[in-house]
Image (cartoon, coloured by chain):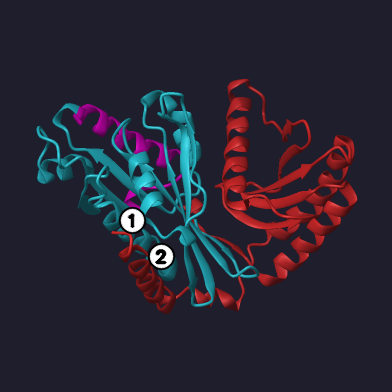
Amino acid sequence: MPLINFAAREINYKIVYYGCGLCGKTTNIQYIHRKVNPSARGKLVSIATEEERTLYFDFLPLSLGTVKGMNTRFHLYTVPGQSHYNASRKLVLQGVDGVVFVADSQISRLDENVESYLNLWDNLLDQSDDLSRLPTVLQLNKRDLTDIFSVADLTELLNHTSSLVVEACALTGVGVFETLKLICKQVIARTAQA
Amino acid sequence: MGTRKALVFSNRQMRRVDEILVRLREASGSRFIALVSTSGQPITSSSVDASPDALSLASLAASSFAATQQLAEILAEREFTLLFHEGRDSNLHVSPVTERVLLVLTFGRETQLGKVRLYTNRAVEALAPIFADAERDEEDLAIDREYSAKADQAIEDLFADAE
C-alpha cells in the first residue's frame, strides 16, 4: 500500500528484497547505493550482526524526483534470510508494494531457495496478502558461478506467478538495475490502475 | 485484499494534523514530532530546529514498534501501548494513533516524561478520528496513466547513468 500525502505532494512505495540467507539481497542494495546518483539516495541503514549477516533489515530510500507534481520515493528493504529470523521477515513485509525474490542459482542451494519462496507465500498470506496479486520480479542471482540451475529449472521451481525474470550477478552489478527498474515500474503501474 | 489499500492523506486532513502536532510540540516541550506509517514511511513532522533524518527515523521507529508488539505477543501481553527509549540527552517516545499510523516524539531534559505522556494521549485522541475517515479528494486523480508514463521515463533516466 503506497503512502500518498497530497499536502506534502509525496508518494512513497515500499519494495522488499526477499530470499534465502546469502543469496545476495544486501549485495543488491549495496550496489544500488554505490552506483545511483548520490542526490537521489538517502542513507543506507543496515541492522546486521557482527559477521555482517542481516539481523533485521537493510533500508535504502531512493527519490525519483517530482513526477506530475508529486515527489515520488521508493523505500528499498531487505529481509534477514536465515530461516530462524522469520518474525523479523514478517515485520519487514508489512505494507509492502512490491517484492524482488532473489534466488541463489547454485544447485547446492535448492532447498534453501524453495523454503524461502514458500515462506514468502506463507508470510504474505498471514497478513492477508497474496503474492499472485503483488508486483514481483524473480532475480536469478550468481549466474557467473558454475554448478547452477538453468533459467528454465529455476523458473519452474520459483515462479508460480508468471513474474518477470532477470539473470544477475549482484556482486558485479549485472542485472541489479534491470531488476530495480522492473519492480519500480510495476508498483507504479499498479497504483495508476487502482 | 484489505491491506493493499493505499494510505492516502488529503490537504484538509494534513492541515488539521499539522495544527495538532505543533500544539503538541509546544505544550509537551518536545524537540521533534513525526507521524509515520506502521510500514515505516514518514507522513509529516514538526521540529524546533534541524530535523533528524526523517526517512531513517520513520523506518527504524516503525520497525522497533512492530518488534515490541511481537514481544508483547510472546509474553502473552495483549499489547505494549508505547515504546520509550531513555538517553543521556534525548529520549524517544513512540505510540500508536491508529492501526496504520504511529506518533514519534523526541524530547530532552527541558521537559518531563509525564508531561509528554499527558499531552501525547490528548493529541492521539484528537488525531485518531482524522485518520479514521478514509478521505480521498479530487487530487487523487493525479495518480493516473499520465503519472505512470512520466514515472516510467523518470525511472529510465535515474537508473540509466548508474548501469
Of B27 and A43, which appears nearest the observer?
A43
Chain on which label 2 sits: A
- Which quadrant of the figure contains the C terminus of chain B? bottom left
Q: Is residue A147 shown above or below B155?
A: above
Of B70 and B65, which appears nearest the observer?
B65
Callout 2: SS: helix
Of A91 and B48, which appears nearest the observer?
B48
- Colour given to chain A in the rendered image: cyan
Instruction: Tell me where residue A188 sits by quadrant.
Output: bottom left
Identified at 50% across, 53% down, the residue is B2
Q: Is residue A127 visible?
A: no
Figure disc tally: 2
Q: Amino acid at mark 1?
A: Leu
First-in-chain label (1 vs 2): 1
Crowdedness near tag 1: few (<14), some (14–19) or many (≥20) residues, C-alpha within 10 Å? many
Letter of the chain shown red in the rendering: B
- Give the number of the disc on residue A180: 1
Crowdedness near tag 2: few (<14), some (14–19) or many (≥20) residues, C-alpha within 10 Å? many
Where residue A111 appears, as percent x and y from the top left, is: 22, 27
Q: Which residue is mark 2?
A: A188
Identified at 63% across, 26% down, the residue is B72
On whether residue A129 falls in the magenta region, the answer is: yes
Q: Amino acid at mark 2?
A: Ile
Of A24 and A79, which appears nearest the observer?
A24
**Magenta part of the protein: which range?**
A109-133
